Image (spheres, rainbow, N blue to C red):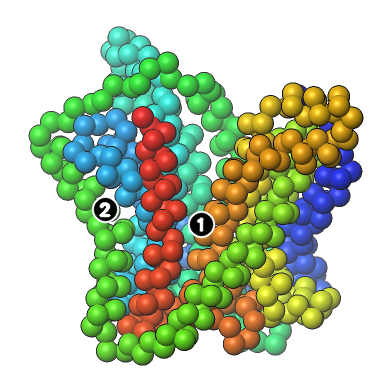
Amino acid sequence: MPSRRIPAGLLWPAGVTAALALLPVAYLAVRSVEGGSAAVARTLLRARTLELAVRSLGLAAVVTALCVIVGVSLAWLVVRSDLPGRRVFGILAALPLAVPSYVAAYTWVASFDLEGFAGSVLVLTLCSYPYVYLPVAAALSRMDPATEEVALSLGRSRYAVVLRQLRPAAAAGGLLVAMYVLAEFGAVAIMRFDVFTTQIYTSYRAGFNRTPAAVLGLLLVLITLVIVAAEFRTRGRAAYAMRGGAARRPPTIRLAPGPKALALAASAALTGLAVGFPLASICYWLLGGSSARLDPADLSAAVGATLGVAAAGALLTTALAVPVGIIAARHRGRTATFLEQSTYVGHSLPGIVMALSLVFFAVRYVPAIYQRWPLLVIAYAVLFMPAAVGAVRASVLQSPPVLEEVARSLGRTPLQAVRTVTLPLALPGVLAGAALVFLTAMKELPATLLLRPTGVETLATRLWTETGSGAYAAAAPYAALLMLLAAVPGFLLGRRSLEETR
């Protein structure tokens, strides 16, 4: 039973987590104010700022619209139709999540010299549509077929009912895509399409006066928070459509021969472009590129640095997330809500803005950790906290509260009951959340570029360096290893999603 009183042993660590998550936003605001109102106005009112806003929002709008169309269509074909090989397509549909967007951009630039708005739209759509596909596929599998039967008996279209019930899931997925595109840095930079994130990076690297970078970062945060607010509103309205589960499986729709062949060709083309093409391109550059100059020592050092910092990030993130997740699962009230939602603020920040904030903070207050591992690990914790908090919260919810009450009746304190009863039961879910953070941190690029120790390269930063100089064959081994390490969880995610639709 949820309670309002939070043990001090959980409250204080959770407060530290919330303060850490809110630190970047607070510091961006302070840094902008310190720059002076004239500097802030000069940055906000210049024509270039308006142009960047239009380009960023335009890219996000087009990619989101395409992802909704692709994700909803593919989810319907996999879950509800008799598409040949739909189980295979169901697994492959989640694999683009294992392809870092900057790796996909690198393969398209290296093969076709595709750049600009069109190239950015293509790459980001192919990498982002699973954000829509996964929730829509889950919603389709839980949909009660009785509503469709009622619509048919009243002479209404089956598809009108289905689309109406899918709207909350599709909107939520679309908003996630919009957030992802606004925060994207590596792919658009490789595609040479200037948006907010690339301009912030350039401004930070080019000038001694970093107030414009802070102002642009704060403006991007405000735009992103508007999208986050819209996402929360969408979640609230979604409850009416997704409450409860279906009593029986929805019927399988049999496609006519012509549409079936067209759907099969489109699904094959989509998975081929999203997963097959990056793999084939990397293999080509591995085998035949003229700029190959692989140094095994550099490659192994990059792998070691990638795995090491990702593991440290996962450990710190999980440790910070445990008290917040337990409070979110076991307690109610404004304090519990504030602590949980504060961890999402950091996640809403683009990696480049997060890194910029931590640079300002470290240089001014704790220079000893500037461009050292601890600062990068903290950045990972702030960026990926929601994944760990969500895993802890879900796992603790599955642990019966009555077991804690039994432990309390035997003389244990609330904190001892949590430590000896709840956490051991929730451990598998907590470890799954840690693994997700580990894999996400491994692919992170902009924060790693700005915060990594001097002279240290990860797979992501080394790939960035090689592609920046046009050495695509030299970048291929780093891209291949990144995709190889990330493919396993992508496959497991797709298989788990398909199992949920059975």
Q: How many marks?
A: 2
Say few, some or many: other residues with alpha carbon within 10 Å of mark 2 (under 14 / 14 to 19 / 20 or more).
some
Q: What percent of the width, then of the height, locates residue 49?
A: 58, 70
Q: Is residue 289 left or right of residue 460?
A: left
Position of residue 463 measured from the top left corner of the image (x, y, whole percent): 44, 78
Above or below for 420 versus 292: above
Residue at position x 37%, y 71% from top? 480
Left or right placement of residue 405 versus residue 267 in this view: right
Give the labeled residue for mark 2.
Answer: 270
Label 2: which secondary element = helix
The tag on residue 475 is none
User: Callout 1, which amino acid?
Assistant: Tyr
Q: Nearer the viewer, residue 199 or 9?
A: 9
Which residue does the numbered mark 1 point to in the structure image?
Answer: 180
Cα distance, mark 2 to mark 1? 20 Å
Dots 2, 1 in contact, CB < 8 A: no
Q: Residue furthest top?
A: 153
Secondary structure of residue under mark 1: helix
Q: Which one is nearer the viewer's eye here, 371 or 315?
A: 315
User: Can the viewer see residue 417 in this picture?
Assistant: yes
Kindly identify the amino acid type of the residue bearing the numbered disc 2: Leu
The C terminus lies in which quarter of the figure? top left
Within-10-Å neighbours for mark 1: few <14, some 14–19, many 20+: many
Viewer-side label of 2, 1: 2
Q: Residue at position x 40%, y 70% from top?
A: 481
* Whether residue 360 is situated above or below residue 258 in the rendered picture: below
The percent coordinates of residue 206 (x first, y second) are 61, 87
- The residue that appears at 58% across and 83% down in the rendered structure is 456
Question: Which image quarter: residue 28?
Answer: bottom right
Q: Quadrant of residue 119?
A: bottom left
Percent across and percent down for residue 228 are 61, 48
Quarter of the picture containing the N terminus is top right
